[in-house]
Amino acid sequence: MKERKLAPFPEDFFWGASTSAYQVEGASLEDGKGPSCQDVKEVPEGTSDLTVCADHYHHYKEDIKLMADMGFKSYRFSIAWTRILPEGTGEINQKGIEFYNNVINECLKYGIEPIVTMFHFDMPAALDARGSWGNPESVEWFVNYAMVLYESFGDRVKYWLTINEQNMLTLVGPVIGTLTIPEGTENVLKEIYQQNHHMLVAQSKAMVLCHEMLPNAKIGPAPNISLVYPATCKPEDVIAAQNFNAVRNWLYLDAAVYGRYNSIVWAWLKQNDACPTFAPGDEEALKNGHPDFIGFNYYNTGTVEADDGSVEESPFGGDQQNGGGVAGMYKSYRNPNLQQTEFGWEIDPVGFRATIREMDSRYDLPMLVTENGLGAYDKVGEDGKVHDPYRIEYLRRHIEQIQEAITDGAEMLGYNPWSAIDLISTHEGMRKRYGFIYVDREDFDLGTMERQIKDSGWWYKKVIESNGEDL
Ligand code: BGP
């Protein structure tokens, strides 16, 4: 076979990593922070609550110093809405502004680009009580919050992400502790997609406002994108894959980039009497929003087959990476070609390349990887260090595929895997670790909270230093 010459990573590539406020910060009600839906949800059995997490709120200086030690060029973190606006709207909490000023300034001190997610799974509890994203006013709540962020941090933050994994909020919201469906709702599907619609409009308006207020800043969405394969080349399976691709992926990016609903999804919602209601001006608002880039989280691909009639009426199921099925649309299928993590998520580096290529040809925008990574049961070895060769292997294989995709012509802005530091998983607690930095605590034993860089972190330092050449 002819050898392929790989294109290099761009010079200013953002090598870094990610966290989210509710999973890393702790101090969940400290210094005036209001409760979010994450603080009031029922904690999954056998896992820690979110009051302390990695206590990043009190350790941010040390944590960012460790990121600088690894040579990070970027740090993607989220701002907790309720630290800034404890009730979601109304009074600003200056202590919250101060905390994120400190985090941002600390990053800049080391030349680390702060990449800020505005909303990562933590709806203010006070707004949940007012109907959450189901309330048409939620659009204005979010835009008002966005304005406070731009005003407070826009002089230093140049990269913004709107809503983390809106598709997962919509598809598996209850599993990750979000998305409130009012009791007694008759058409749950319609309610879910009405909430989703409000998020789409809110996102568009926030993008427009960003461009107005911060002409030098860049903003994009951050959905979880997994290309979906058909289980076989049976035409019915191909249709099923197109269906799940539309429901899982393209709905979100078509709306963000082109300001329109994906037609396969719209037709399916129509069949179920579940099309969202547009308020006056929504159509225009969707059209007006234009992302500068696509931020996306990638963990693996999906595979589906045609529904043989066995998929139950209830729509979704599973978690972010393990789909259930939708009656008449698709049924999830275990891909026999792929290995799995200890937590049952498939591993598909080549699918990463395929996913990037597909987005490139559909949207033709630069792309920023905002998550990717391996959750595992890391343990401290007898030498007191954390040896995680499995994570190095996972990351190496994925980084290789980014380079393949760059060589294929995709414009890639950066790689910010999950996670910079160990933190609490969405529904698997502290035991499912992703970090480059190990935190000494367990689910129910807060330990010493001491930090140390894992083998993967030292390896990543070399990768960054060599701009991806030394893998
Ligand atoms: C993404 C979320 C993150 C994160 C990650 C790993 O869906 O954006 O918040 O936690 O997945 O998921 P988990 O913690 O369930 O392993």
Image (cartoon, helix red, strand yellow):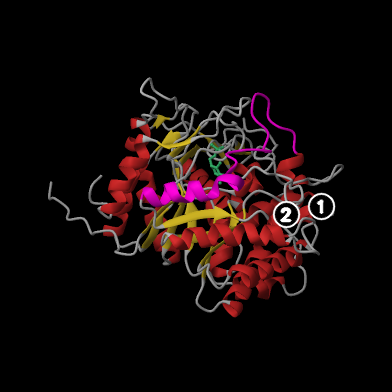
User: Is-magenta flag for residue 53?
Assistant: yes
In the depicted structure, whether residue 428 falls above or below residue 250: above
Task: Read off the residue under disc 2.
Answer: 82
Q: Residue 55: which numbered mark, if any?
A: none
- Where residue 53 appears, as percent x and y from the top left, is 61, 38
Residue segment shown in magenta: 41-70
Query: Residue visible at 49% across and 70% down?
Result: 292
Query: Residue visible at 51% across and 38% down?
Result: 422
In the depicted structure, whether residue 449 falls above or below residue 136: above
Q: Nearer the viewer, mark 1 or mark 2?
A: 2
Q: Is residue 210 left or right of residue 368?
A: right
Q: Nearer the viewer, residue 426 or 423?
A: 423
The quarter of the rendered structure image containing the C terminus is top left
Q: Is residue 394 visible?
A: no
Q: Amino acid at mark 1?
A: Ala
Mark 1, secondary structure of its residue: helix
Q: Residue 126: which numbered mark, if any?
A: 1
- Where residue 245 appears, as percent x and y from the top left, is 51, 49
User: Is-magenta flag for residue 387?
Assistant: no
Query: Residue visible at 74% across and 53% down?
Result: 274
Few, some or many C-alpha atoms within 10 Å of disc 2 (few <14, some 14-19, many ≥20)? many
Q: Nearer the viewer, residue 444 or 356?
A: 444
- Where residue 421 appears, as percent x and y from the top left, is 49, 42
The quadrant of the rendered image in which ligand 1 is seen is top right
Q: Is residue 214 visible?
A: yes
Quarter where residue 40 is shown:
top right
Mark 2, secondary structure of its residue: helix
Q: Nearer the viewer, residue 461 or 331?
A: 461
- Where residue 169 appears, as percent x and y from the top left, is 65, 48
**Dot 1 and dot 2 residues touching (CB under 8 Å):** yes
Query: Residue visible at 68% across and 49% down?
Result: 122
Q: Amino acid at mark 2?
A: Thr
